[in-house]
Amino acid sequence: MSYCTNCGKKLAENEVCTCKSNQQTNPLPPPPQFDYMGRPLFTAQGEPITYDENGNAVIHKNKSNKNGCLIAIIVTIIVTLIIGAILAAILVPAMLGYVKKSKVQNANAMARTIYRSMNSALVEMDASDIKIDGKYIICSDKSNNMLYNNNIDTDALYSIFYEYAVLPDECEWFAIIEDGTVVYVAFEKSEDHIVGTYPVTSDSLQNNIPVYNSTGTIVDADLDDLYEFAVMNIT
């Protein structure tokens, strides 16, 4: 029993398949699609098939296509990494600058809150005939207070102040009072190390931080720097 190598038809003894005579004449006839036993010689994707001695099919993958796909994948990955690096170089500094500016603005807002709350406390104390005149540096850490006379009741001031002010945890600040009015506040949130001031504020990312009793500024100062400057210039 044999099979047609063109169409795979089972042929009787001495039978000749007529499939070729029914096809149009072609100077380059297609290669056989089936072997003498009627087994396919190609997969649907055109990959050659051979058979071992046990009749098991062996498919021969197209190595050139496989290598081409691998190269295309590698090129795609490289291009993606390059584009990602370029975007990161552009966007990351801009994002970091935006985040830092936002923190500076928040620190300035906290300094303004202290300024207003402390002035409200002073007004309330004055209305209660509690003396508030003189010059003082009032700090979040009471041990750093500088009292240039003894006319102000700091316990009353803190008590009334914290009724007005809502401040974040882990922050430090100081306020300078002159004759019953707050004239300068500096604030720093411990985890950010970003300084905010009031009434003169700066959004320039700590490049020009205003200082007390001066038209000058300090670059990248922390709260301790501003406090030391205030102590030197308050008298």
Image (cartoon, rainbow, N blue to C red):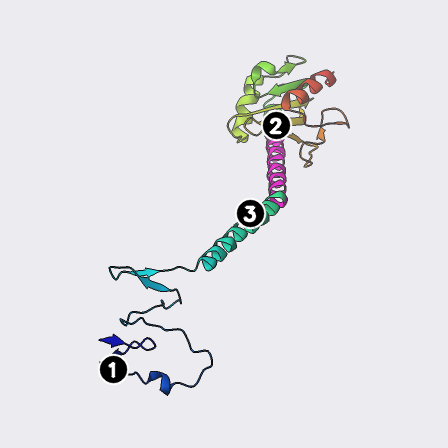
Instruction: Name the residue that disc number 1 marks.
Output: 14
Instruction: Name the residue that disc number 2 marks.
Output: 187
Q: Does the magenta-highlighted stretch encompass residue 132?
A: no
Q: Amino acid at mark 3?
A: Leu
Question: Considering only order in the chain, which callout, 2 or 3, is on the residue closer to the N terminus?
Answer: 3
Say which residue appears at 59% left-offset and 30% top-offset. Answer: 117
Please identify, in this view, whether the residue under mark 1 or under mark 3 is nearer the observer. 1
In front of the other: 161 or 191 = 191
Q: Mark 2 Cα within 10 Å, few/some/many (few <14, many 20+)?
A: many
Residue 198 drawn above or below residue 87: above
Q: Amino acid at mark 1?
A: Asn
Cα–Cα span, label 3 and label 2: 42 Å
Dot 1: what SS?
loop
- Residue 132 visible? The answer is no
In front of the other: 94 or 160 = 94
Measuring from the top left, give residue 73's x and y in whole percent: 50, 53
Quadrant of residue 142 in the image?
A: top right
Instruction: Name the residue that disc number 3 marks.
Output: 81
Count of numbered tags:
3
Q: Amino acid at mark 2?
A: Phe
Q: Mark 3 Cα within 10 Å, few/some/many (few <14, many 20+)?
A: few
